[in-house]
Image (spheres, rainbow, N blue to C red):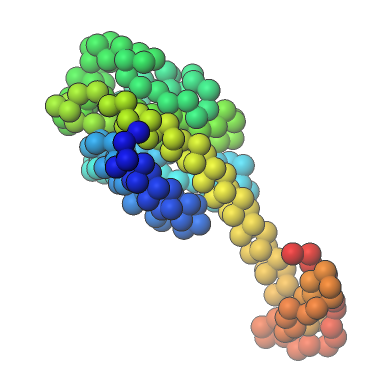
Amino acid sequence: MSGELAAKLSGVLGSLYDAALEPEQWPAVLAAIRTAVGAEVSALFHWDAGASPVTGNVSAISGYPESSVATYEKYFSRIDIRRPAVTGLPPGTVYLDDRQMAFADVSRSEIFHDFYRPRGLGHCMAAQFFADPVRISMLSVHRPLSHGAFRPDEVAFFESLTPHLIRALQLQRQLARARHVAQGMAVGLDHFQIAVILVDRDAKANACRPPPRTRAVGCTRISVAP
């Protein structure tokens, strides 16, 4: 990987883990990734039923107009010959045209002629992140047809990024679960008819307040470990 791409990787990683904390930042991360590898578009789809309720989902795009995404999902997703090749790989393994599938075969497909070629798109890199029935996750980048195949240093950049994407999505899942638990505790506390003192493992109080619109008639101590 060139020094320039290594510097870009360092910058993308900071934004990547920020997005795990603030999911609305995912489109900016995708824009940085596609720019780094000379791609025209990038798309991330992450569906996670493991968080209950489902709060860990991401659907973010960069470079695609909304109309193209709708067209792909409505029809072309079912005939995308690259998708089985990507999902058949071990999680985190990068798919690359002319590595797992000849680009000549891709270029003869219906989806290439009717979807990618009219948009000027050619070679693709992609990876799925989890072999888990409750999680479906894939990132893909496509570069202009006129640019040819991805260079080895661009592939190295993408391969170096992939394990961090997996960790960031795992972190997002854990944070989503923690937020759900915290929200549930807050709702439960607001239904108490007595005041509540929350203490840490050293029995030091964190808060004591009656729920809204209620009168404190007693005080119960609940111990919550950090």
Q: What residue occupies the far front of the structure in this picture?
A: 3
Give percent across and percent down for residue 140.
36, 33
Question: Is residue 29 placed above or below 72 in the rendered structure?
Answer: below
Question: Is residue 211 placed above or below 88 in the rendered structure?
Answer: below
Question: Is residue 156 placed above or below 185 in the rendered structure?
Answer: above
User: Quadrant of residue 196 in the image?
Assistant: bottom right
Residue at 51% over, 46% down: 168
Q: Quadrant of the C terminus?
A: bottom right
Front-most of residues 197 and 158: 158
Give percent across and percent down for residue 158.
38, 34
Residue 181 visible in rendering: yes
User: Quadrant of residue 37 in the image?
Assistant: top left
Give percent across and percent down for residue 184.
68, 63
User: Quadrant of residue 97 in the image?
Assistant: top left
Residue at 73% over, 78% down: 206
Residue 30 visible in rendering: no
Residue at 19% over, 19% down: 113
Number of numbered discs visible in the structure rendering:
0
Residue at 66% over, 83% down: 212
Front-most of residues 163 and 177: 163
Relative to 23, is 130 on the left or the right? right
Give percent across and percent down for residue 45.
42, 39
Relative to 82, is 193 on the left or the right? right
Q: Quadrant of the N terminus?
A: top left
Relative to 204, is 27 on the left or the right? left
Relative to 106, is 188 on the left or the right? right
